[in-house]
Image: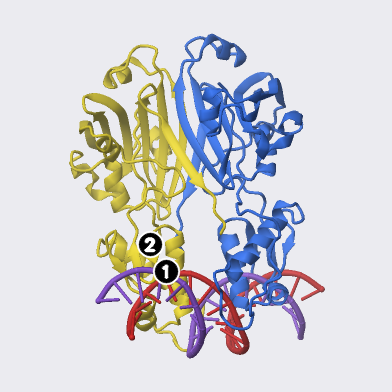
Chain colours: A yellow, B blue, C purple, D red
Amino acid sequence: MACLCEALYTASMTEADAFLPNSRDAGAVVNGGSEPRYREIKRSIVASIRSGRLKPGDRVNSEAEIVERFGVSRMTANRALRELTDAGLLMRRSGAGTFVADSKPIGHMIEIRNIADEIRARGHAYRPRVLRNDTVKADARQAALLDVRVGTRLFHSVVVHHEADFPLQLEDRLVLASAAPGYGEIDFHQQTPNEYLTRIAPIARAEHRVTSMLPDPEVRALLGMRELDPVLVMERRTWSSDHLVSHAVLTHPASRYALTATFEVKLD
Amino acid sequence: MACLCEALYTASMTEADAFLPNSRDAGAVVNGGSEPRYREIKRSIVASIRSGRLKPGDRVNSEAEIVERFGVSRMTANRALRELTDAGLLMRRSGAGTFVADSKPIGHMIEIRNIADEIRARGHAYRPRVLRNDTVKADARQAALLDVRVGTRLFHSVVVHHEADFPLQLEDRLVLASAAPGYGEIDFHQQTPNEYLTRIAPIARAEHRVTSMLPDPEVRALLGMRELDPVLVMERRTWSSDHLVSHAVLTHPASRYALTATFEVKLD
DNA sequence: GAGTGGTCTAGACCACGAC
DNA sequence: TCGTGGTCTAGACCACTCC
């Protein structure tokens, strides 16, 4: 069916700002089964970024400020900020401060770029051709793909992403309606399905399967391909929190598209 | 032209045990431009694993032991062990101890499996067909791929990996001779090229490019493919420490092989 | 009960950046 | 100069595991 590759944003961690007022005997040790302080601080920062209150480039509370606001020691504040920095969510400059990092694509993992951005970065016009965006009740096959019961309400969108006038990717996507209620209303000219989803339901886990084949005539026509040109097909399932949110089949003409992935291992 | 996908092992960090005797005024703070203590400890542990002195499942020094041996505070020992654990190199069980983790394939990132293991896991016989394994002097094209000067000594191996009697992957690999001097002597029946390389020159960085095409007749024959079946081609460049070590083109029949990648994001 | 990791504190010195 | 992060210490309490 269809293929497309957009940005997967970092960040996980559920819940909103909910860093409870903290009825904990702050001073001493104690941590009676509750969440560690550093993690609580991380949650609150992640939530601030999620909610849009903190945007890339914005300054985050300094360690000293966190010490005061949360009533923790500097080591604890440091750990929270350091771990978020290691995770790529923040950037720190000694002497200057801590800042929200540019919303990195999936960091070191697979660098799957936002197709729209990618196209624009090449100086071309991005144009989506929306073939459908409906509400459906899951049939057996769809239910299996999203691991839900038959009849569950889903969105089903099919979009062809064009670079200038050339179709580059065919995206066929199923979305769990309960996880992204507004999906049916999106104007794909304003944001790609994945852009929307990563904002609404931040990706916690993604599973990919890449293969290739000769496309059937219909797909070949949609992608404006010559005969005997294979397509590169990427199937992607994404989870948010703990449930499957979306299944996408992203199909591209192999002659015009290659997937790239790069990663580093650093232990220092 | 060849393709194969093996395990990429974790771990980075250069140098051997070299944790200098540490002429640092231990007691106080000070860190006059030298390496932080926690990183030094990490290096030493990584080196122990690298050298084979510590194997998966082995117990690592406890925090208390590190405190004594390195003359650091427990927080520092804890940081070293915790970071290596987060990186997937170690496993900790509260109350029990710290252990070397099973040599994880690239962890959460791309799970690219060792083709030999993968085949055996499916209960089939793995059989390599070695077409060549020569020493060559880099020509212009090869020099560009490995980012070295023309004439640099390289190994060039071509192997077809079979599952039972079916060719599954064609691997065409260039290896920088100076980085893996023994490569030319490997018996690929004993270990795959990548197995050897990950042991000799642990991967610090990898770059992938995946595409597909219709194979030329020669490749098609080597892979025992029918006409009009596309191949899935993965090109991979791997770095160790700071230099490019290997370039591989891994080609598989799309009808018999799919790449999978899965990753999780966790910020807690 | 002894040992282990998990967390936390209240100090500290340092290099760096902004003013 | 003052605030920032980067590192480090020498204690501490806790829950857990293993014996």
Q: On the image, numbered disc 2 is attached to which residue?
A: A90
Q: In percent of the image, x 38 and y 66: which residue is there? A: A93
User: What kind of element bears circle 1?
Assistant: helix
Which image quarter: residue B166? Answer: top right
Label 1: chain?
A
Q: Is residue A230 above or below residue A56?
A: above
Which image quarter: residue B195? Answer: top right
- Horizontally, is A101 left or right of B15 in the view? left
Q: Is residue A132 above or below residue A155?
A: above
**Residue A120 location, x and y as percent?**
24, 37
- Density class for disc 2 (Cα within 10 Å; few <14, some 14-19, many ≥20) is many
Label 2: chain?
A
Residue A99 numbered mark, or none: none
State how far apart marks 1 and 2 are (Cα). 8 Å
**Residue A111 location, x and y as percent?**
41, 42
Nearer to me, B155 or A186: B155
Q: Quadrant location of the N terminus of chain B?
A: top right
Residue A81 numbered mark, or none: 1
